[in-house]
Image (cartoon, rainbow, N blue to C red):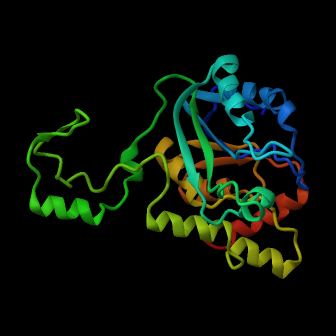
Amino acid sequence: MRQLPDRSVNLVFTSPPYALHFKKAYGNVSKADYVEWFMPFAQQIHRILTDDGSFVLNIGGSWNPGQPTRSLYHYKLMIALVEQIGFFLAQECYWYNPAKMPVPAEWVTVRRVRIKDSVEHVWWLSKTPQPKANNRNVLRPYSADMLRLAKKGVKATQRPSGHNINSSFDKIASGGSIPSNVIEDRVANEMLIAGNNSANDPYTRRCKETGTKIHPARFPAVLPEFFIKLLTDDGDLVLDPFAGSNTCGAVAHRLGRRWMSMELLEEYVEASKFRFEEPL
């Protein structure tokens, strides 16, 4: 990233190695050292982003060793990104992944004193308070209830919360509903499960056919797709500095964006070429 010009990247979307209790083959830093380790990357990301650009960081939580309590390392990182680097927190988003394993087994499946963790944080950060974004690009299909309301009509009223419901509430001319910060509708969930728990997606299948090592921490294509559509336009530059199997690069390519991906391990770079053989 040090070789890239200032203000040259429209979106940085990435998922670095998490500070997990158990070490992974691709390497991950301890919780105690994580913020300090990530700060040099964050400084470069801030420098290369355009003034209306965004930095979207997918990061999972972690348990403290030896006890059923959660680490705060990812919250500390987010605060450091804002207070030390100068990012703005545009919005907290969440990746709902119902296919996650029920771990740590000692607390979830053996002693039964905790519940399964099925979400990961997605911090949407920006270089200025007004990053480029357009939620019209990520509208969801209207729910059956909304379609019913549009047909039946809604009376103007005020909810107990104080929110005003006016006569235009039931109009569906905008073409879809504004998505929430949790990807939770039925279609999205199917894509998430398929993307993270499938043995027959093109990338996994080609790795198995060629005896190539499969990256152990892949995120589904729907995740970068959502933010690339929300935060960039055709021809914008998308960067993933922790590319892994290069899902982000492949999605950006399919959506007509320019893209750059960085990955230390050559075997993962070679395997990522399979993502461009067939549509995601």
- Residue 103 occupies which quadrant of the picture? bottom right
Which of the image's four quarters has the C terminus? bottom right
Let me know if residue 280 appears in the view. Answer: no
**Residue 199: % across, % down:** 72, 77
Task: Give above or below for 147 relative to 8.
Answer: below
Task: Give above or below for 148 relative to 41.
Answer: below
Q: Residue at x 82, y 33 (%)?
A: 34
- Residue 61 occupies which quadrant of the picture? top right
Position of residue 144 in the picture relative to residue 64 (left or right): left
Position of residue 5 in the picture relative to residue 255 (left or right): right
User: Looking at this view, is 197 or 279 the one in front?
Assistant: 197
User: Looking at this view, is 206 or 113 the one in front?
Assistant: 113
Q: Residue at x 18, y 64 (%)?
A: 148
**Residue 232: % across, % down:** 50, 43
Q: Residue at x 86, y 46 (%)?
A: 66
**Residue 143: % across, % down:** 30, 62
Position of residue 61 in the picture relative to residue 157 (left or right): right
**Residue 187: % across, % down:** 46, 67
- Residue 35 occupies which quadrant of the picture? top right
Q: Residue at x 22, y 32 (%)?
A: 162
